[in-house]
């Protein structure tokens, strides 16, 4: 069998774009949630965590409906920008951002909440703004949480199936990512190809997670020695 690397390329391209977008969106939100004392905080957290507990088909259905031409949002985007967001790569990006959002937000928020309050207060006393405190004080002190958030988001996006299938379908070179390719191999009883693709995904996932655990172990060791 000739190995077609295009589904892997699409998977990693999608995961990279989604990780960058979610980092830029989730970073200020995680910081805000970690600092707020609002009584509505549990509501915000529960809403942001919905993609974790929702069946992928449920989320995929609502995203598919929202982005289709039959919805006001989908019709508006197509009329103004001339872009259809269903069954193409752009739709996958939008759907994946919604599905993987809590995997970026929660580790960052946990990292910020683990920081000593005295560290944040000292920054404010020195005249630093909230943004300066975030960039120059908070972020450098949550390296483990930062790496965990990025890697888990990337890995989760690479492994997506239900949402990707419903919103993007299986268009070669456009939306046929590795998880969809494996599904189609199983459907056609091509177990040899499914084994090969699955083994590649397992190897990549294990390697990435191993590197994260090694990094976090070294960070904890450095902190202990310090």
Image (cartoon, helix red, strand yellow):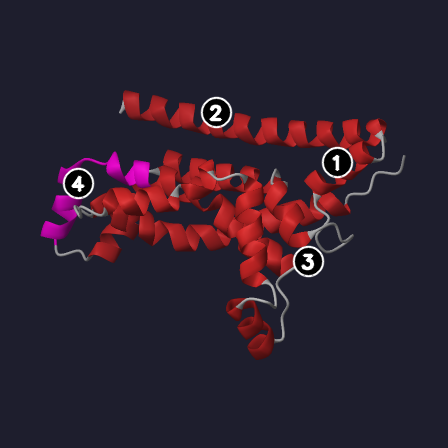
Q: Secondary structure at mark 2?
A: helix
Give the side of residue 170 with respect to residue 43, left or right.
right
State the image quarter where residue 159 is shown. Answer: top right
Where is residue 65 shown, x and y percent of the image? Answer: 57, 58
At 32% from the left and 41% from the top, the residue drawn is: 109
Does residue 140 sit above or below 221 in this rendering? below
For the residues labelled 3 and 1, the Cα–Cα distance comes to: 18 Å
Q: Earlier in the sequence, mark 3 or mark 1?
A: 3
Does residue 145 sit above or below 44 in this rendering? above
Where is residue 146 shown, x and y percent of the image? Answer: 40, 40
Type of secondary structure dominating the magenta stretch? helix
Which residue is tagged 2? 214
The circle on residue 182 is 1
Q: Secondary structure at mark 3?
A: loop
Residue contact at pointers 4 and 3, CB within 8 angstroms: no
The circle on residue 119 is 4
Residue at the extreme left: 125
Q: Earlier in the sequence, mark 3 or mark 2?
A: 3
10 Å neighbourhood of mark 3: few (<14), some, or many (≥20)?
Answer: many
Q: Secondary structure at mark 4?
A: helix
Q: What range of the chain is rendered magenta?
A: 109-126
Q: Earlier in the sequence, mark 4 or mark 2?
A: 4
At 23% from the left and 36% from the top, the residue drawn is: 115
At 55% from the left and 38% from the top, the residue drawn is: 156
Residue contact at pointers 3 and 1, CB within 8 angstroms: no
Which residue is tagged 3? 87
Q: Secondary structure at mark 1?
A: helix
Quadrant in which the C terminus is drawn: top left
Q: Earlier in the sequence, mark 4 or mark 3?
A: 3
> Is 3 inside the magenta-drawn segment?
no
């Amino acid at each position: 069998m000739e190995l077609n690397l295009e589904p892997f390329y699409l998977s990693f391209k999608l995961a990279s774009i989604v990780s960058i977008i979610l980092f830029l969106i989730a970073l200020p939100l995680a910081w805000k949630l970690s600092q707020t004392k609002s009584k509505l905080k549990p509501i915000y957290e529960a809403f942001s965590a919905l993609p974790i507990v929702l069946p992928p088909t449920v989320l995929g259905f609502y995203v598919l409906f929202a982005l289709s031409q039959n919805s006001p949002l989908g019709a508006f985007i197509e009329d103004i920008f001339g872009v259809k967001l269903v069954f193409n790569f752009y739709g996958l990006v939008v759907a994946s951002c919604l599905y993987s959002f809590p995997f970026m937000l929660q580790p960052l928020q946990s990292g910020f909440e683990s920081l000593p309050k005295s560290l944040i207060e000292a920054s404010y006393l020195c005249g630093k703004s909230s943004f300066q405190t975030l960039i120059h004080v908070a972020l450098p002190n949550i390296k483990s949480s930062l790496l965990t958030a990025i890697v888990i988001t990337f890995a989760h996006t690479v492994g997506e199936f239900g949402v990707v299938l419903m919103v993007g379908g299986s268009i070669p070179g456009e939306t046929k990512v590795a998880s969809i390719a494996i599904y189609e191999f199983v459907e056609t009883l091509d177990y040899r190809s499914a084994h090969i693709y699955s083994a590649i995904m397992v190897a990549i996932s294990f390697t990435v997670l191993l590197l994260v655990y090694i990094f976090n172990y070294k960070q904890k060791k450095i902190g202990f020695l310090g």
